[in-house]
Amino acid sequence: MGFKEHFIIPEGMIYMNTPGNGLIPKKIREWRVERDQTFFDPRVTLREEQTPFIQGVRESLATFFNTTEKHVYCTPNFSFGFNVLLDGLPKHLKFLLIAGDYPSLNYPIISRGFAYDTVELSITLEVDIWQHVEQQKPDVLAISIIQYISGVKIDLSFIKKLKEAFPDLLIIGDGTQYFGTEPFSFPASGFDAIGGSGYKWLMAGFGNGYTILNEKMQALIYQEAQQKQRPKEAMWSSKTILHTYFEPGHQDTLSHGTLQQSLHFLTELGLSRVQQQLQETTSYAYEKFQEHNLLLPIAAQRATQSSLINVQIDPNHFGTLMAQQVRCFPRGTGIRIGLHLYNDKQDIDQLLAIIDKI
Ligand SMILES: Cc1ncc(COP(=O)(O)O)c(C=O)c1O
């Protein structure tokens, strides 16, 4: 069975809006319906099992990212976790950002008054970051692993080398446009913190996200609070101080359960197979778009490709594409698409045929 069979896509539709939000697999849709029905029934104790349930989600996230659950926090989305992380950092830290990175990555740093510099998004992104770190010595690099407009993916082996060369540099990665596309090991990555929302490439709908911190980051943030006494109330007995910040209230178990199901789904398929399928469709798309001169120059020239592609046609054609059942989104100078498990080479051929007629 091909991967497409795991999804319900209406006849004639080409769903390419994963960078906006991903489709939920059939199996998980069924899980959600069944779970909600059980949840409504007052005879079952599901609603009382919130704490162990979320603990189970943390464990699934830990397994997925090859870490242990004490490093994992369940959040409603990327931005929530990232804001909490920033509020816990010492205020004197100086950041390095990528110009034009996702607004809820850059803006909370700027609005909180942290000192910062930016590097331009260019073909030589990695070299430019390295030089900046060497010369300006920022304390923190905050970067989206895949840029939301251009699809530029940072070379992940570069992040490891950067960390080895500058161990004091804190590296924070936003993986919302990346996690779910290939295997990833947090401890081996060079990142001190990662986070993301689950509704895009993890195909888990809205309302769930995660923040993962290594021990160094855990020790650095909210230092004053961490030295004070723990809350004594029994209901918080299982919470660390950091949990009281990242998970201050009750979480939505349907939404986080969906994320957990999605992690299981991807693990069962095998992330290496997912990666292989995405690489195949992506390199086919690159080849075809290159032939039609539809790639952003930066995407065409860089060695690392991602499955988020900005197709260089006038963004005003968005309405025409939607009318032809192509789900996509206008971003920057073009139309942004994403190629996930439910896309194949035929989708790309069909898209090109539509574009040719515009
Ligand atoms: C790079 C990147 N990070 C994060 C997000 C989502 O963050 P949130 O769900 O907190 O709005 C997006 C959504 O477009 C994104 O493109």
Image (cartoon, grey):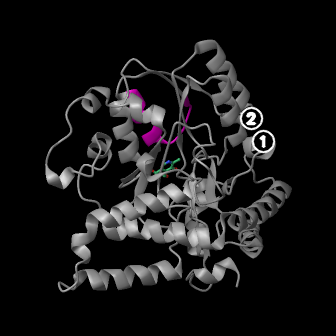
Q: How packed is label 1: few (under 14 Cα within 10 Å), some, or many (20 or more)?
A: some
Q: Residue 66: percent from the left, percent from the top?
A: 57, 53
* Relative height, residue 22 to residue 74 (above, below): below
C-alpha distance separating marks 1 and 2:
6 Å
Amino acid at dot 2? Ile
Amino acid at dot 1? Arg
* Relative height, residue 180 to residue 112 (above, below): below
Residue behind mark 2: 123
Q: Residue 207: percent from the left, percent from the top?
A: 36, 61
* Relative height, residue 97 to residue 75 (above, below): above
Q: Is mark 1 within 8 Å of ligand 1?
A: no
Q: How packed is label 2: few (under 14 Cα within 10 Å), some, or many (20 or more)?
A: some
Which of these two is toward me, 191 or 304? 191
Residues drawn in magenta: 97-110
* Residue pictured at 60% horizontal, 79% vertical: 13
Residue behind mark 1: 302
Q: Is residue 289 left or right of residue 73?
A: right
Which of these two is toward me, 146 or 311? 146
Q: How many marks do you count on the picture?
A: 2
The answer to whether mark 1 and mark 2 are in CB contact below 8 A is: yes
* Residue pictured at 60% horizontal, 25% vertical: 167
First in residue order: circle 1 vs circle 2? 2
* Residue pictured at 46% horizontal, 39% vertical: 105
Quadrant of the frame with the C terminus: bottom right
Which of these two is toward me, 301 or 317? 301
Quadrant of the frame with the N terminus: bottom right
Q: Residue 351: percent from the left, percent from the top?
A: 71, 69
Is 242 magenta? The answer is no
